[in-house]
Image (cartoon, rainbow, N blue to C red):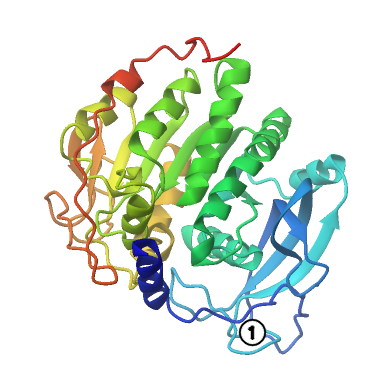
Amino acid sequence: MLKRILLAGLTVLAGCGHPTGVMTPVALTAKTPKTSQVEMLVATTRQQSGDPATLFNGERSPKPYLTDIAISIPPKRAAGTVQWPERLPPNPATDFAVTRVEQLETRTEGRAWFKQHLVDGHALVFVHGFNNTYEDSVFRLAQIVHDSGMKATPVLFTWPSRARLTAYEYDKESTNYSRTALEQALRILAQDPSVKDITILAHSMGTWLAMESLRQMGIRDGHVNPKIRDVILASPDIDIQVFAKQFVEMGTPHPKFTIFVSQDDRALAVSSLITGKVSRLGAIDPSKEPYRSRLEEAGITAIDLTKVDTGDKLNHGKFAESPEIVQLIGQRLMTGQPLTDSNITLGEGVAAVVGGTVQTVGKVAGTAVAAPLAIAEHPPVAAKPVKVEDTLHSDPQSEPLTQ
């Protein structure tokens, strides 16, 4: 009963949504104002919908699919926003609009596409979160690529989400269903000699999928492929102890990890209650013990976005909706630049834990302060800090429970 009340509260907070069925390509004409174009390769384990307006639904497919997609972005819009059309077909002058859809039938075609769209040998693989349709994830990645100014070839991995708040368990199982397909996609990218490095950007429940795929790769090979240089986890919906176990079992050396956290994340607060009041990685205060020392030990950078206000009622998509944060991803984290100099402006009071030290990366020094949560009149119970020392120090080659 409590779960239903909480999900109902999130439904109200999330709003009324947007038009669906926007994947049918529209033509740009001579009268269309000059727009920006984002081209991406989309890999999915979703089932084909049979409708060109949606392409893929939220059910699971045993066969992965590759699609070449181009998105037109209107010239006048606020950074951090996706301009969904008010009516169909979209108007490229004011709306995000699909301008090309082409199904690729083989890996060879996929490699050829990547070679044609190569940007300095850098690849970005984006894994979306819970409650996303196929078109949600396509438009979100287009917005991130455009607003961040990143110099990389974008690849979207979209898994079978039913895009309903009541389908949390189904979506979680869909990430497990898709982890080998993501691992294989990463391997194929890494095997391409033209690819110098790969950055993984995962959000919410998609961080679980990313971590599981990297863990599988580490178990098979003893370590993650060295071309996977950076892993960015935004609002990670992962049990803290489970994350520590995944991190250890992917072997060494590790990619460079950055996590975006926010203690006022309402979606993660509900996830914590659904999963038995277990602390989620994306809701910790990284400046407090024991997290601060454990992050230092693991070499993980944590950026606290609690004080960042993007207008997101759930406070769950700040990484993409804040112009400063999305530019940080594209201009610094993906290029390996440090977060400790004076050239970063992220807004008031944003703090990062780098090497165990709280570094100011905003205009005002100080540790972010958690805001009180109120979800459907049932505030979450504050979770006790979780000890992860034993997990971090466990033997990654430990014997399995069964032979």
* Residue 38 or residue 216, whichever sits in front: 216
- Measured as percent of width and height from the top left, residue 16 is found at 48, 82
Q: Where 4 sits versus 344, above or below?
A: below
Residue at image position (57%, 65%) is: 163
- Callout 1: SS: loop
The image quarter containing residue 132 is bottom right
Q: Residue furthest front?
A: 1
The image quarter containing residue 183 is top right
Residue at image position (37%, 15%) is: 394
Q: Is residue 232 left or right of residue 281?
A: right
- Measured as percent of width and height from the top left, residue 287 is found at 18, 40
- Measured as percent of width and height from the top left, residue 204 is found at 45, 52
Q: Quadrant of the N terminus?
A: bottom left
Residue 150 appears in the rendering = no
Q: Where 129 sits versus 225, above or below?
A: below
* Residue 132 or residue 115, whichever sits in front: 132
Q: Where 211 sits versus 261, above or below?
A: above
Residue 268 appears in the rendering = yes
Q: Amino acid at mark 1?
A: Pro
The image quarter containing residue 128 is bottom right
Report the residue marked by disc 1.
33
Q: Residue furthest left?
A: 366
Q: Mark 1 packing: few (<14 Cα in 10 Å), some, or many (20+)?
A: some
Q: Where 239 sits versus 159, above or below?
A: above
Q: Is residue 318 left or right of residue 188?
A: left
Residue at image position (70%, 72%) is: 98
* Residue 57 or residue 73, whichever sits in front: 57
Q: Quadrant of the C terminus?
A: top right
- Measured as percent of width and height from the top left, residue 175 is found at 58, 45
Task: Please state the total of marks drawn on the protein image.
Answer: 1
